Image (cartoon, rainbow, N blue to C red):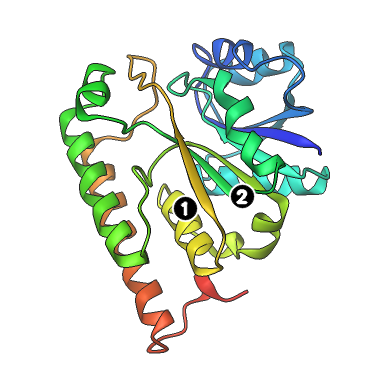
Amino acid sequence: MKVIAVMPAYNAERTLEPTYRDIPPGIVDEIILVDDASTDKTVEIAEKLGLTVVRHPVNRGYGANQKTCYRLALEKGADIIVMIHPDYQYDSRLIIYIIGLLKEGFLDVMLGSRIRSRKEALQGGMPLYKYFANRTLTFIENISLGMNLSEWHTGFRAFTRKVLETIPWQNNSDDFVFDSQVLVQCVAFGFRIGEIPVPVRYHETSSSINFRRSLKYGIQTIITVFKFILHRMHIIKCKLFIK
């Protein structure tokens, strides 16, 4: 099975190489980095490392970056697509475990969860408000969607080809809520979602949205869940959940 890792990147010059170096040799067939008009040396470093590099001429947003990542991975014939942020917040050595259950056909989507315990999350540097916001949103999503995931908001996730060929991710936002929309779509289309714990690594070079954008993301996530409930009840028709 062909495994392609994709990295949506923006100003990741300080963390890209260590993230890349931690990927176990021979685990992925290709790494695609999509640069969203960085102003630093992200592209130069990625090319030096031998990654497949595509650059947006203007900053199009986190969701738009992922759309390019997934389109390219599918065009290149990926059977499994792993998305990992190149900010060294997630331990890329765990890719081997993330993709294992997908390769064996037990699951369709795998997530790397940073929330194994409150103590571990906070000791890893996760800001207190982000921890509680994460827990609150995850609780709402689990109750509303009939799931029992420990975290819905990780930037370390993997999909089978069938998932990305089925869900209408092209209709999603170009902003950060893209991540939430994708997972709600996976639930809507009946895909099996699993997770493994990953270490929490917040540091000064980690990418992290500010409080205002976090609040916007949270509100948009709740709206997405509400739209799905209304769609499932046949009260509205939402393009996010129509193939």
Can residue 124 be seen at all in this image of the molecule? Answer: yes
Q: CA distance from mark 2 to mark 1?
A: 9 Å
| Residue 198, quarter of the rendered image | top left
Can residue 68 be seen at all in this image of the molecule? Answer: no
Q: Residue at x 80, y 37 (%)?
A: 2
In the picture of the structure, the residue carrying the numbered disc 2 is: 67
Q: Residue at x 35, y 22 (%)?
A: 200
Nearer-the-camera pick, 26 or 48: 26
Crowding near the residue tagged with mark 2, few <14, some 14–19, many ≥20 C-alpha atoms within 10 Å: many
Q: Residue at x 42, y 38 (%)?
A: 154
Using the image, determine if residue 50 lies above or below residue 189: above
Specify the label residue 178 is tagged with.
1
Residue 49 drawn at (x, y percent): 71, 12
| Relative to 127, 224 lies left or right | right
Circles 2 and 1, Cβ within 8 Å, touching? The answer is yes
Using the image, determine if residue 88 lies above or below residue 111: above
Amino acid bearing label 2: Lys
Residue 160 drawn at (x, y percent): 68, 49
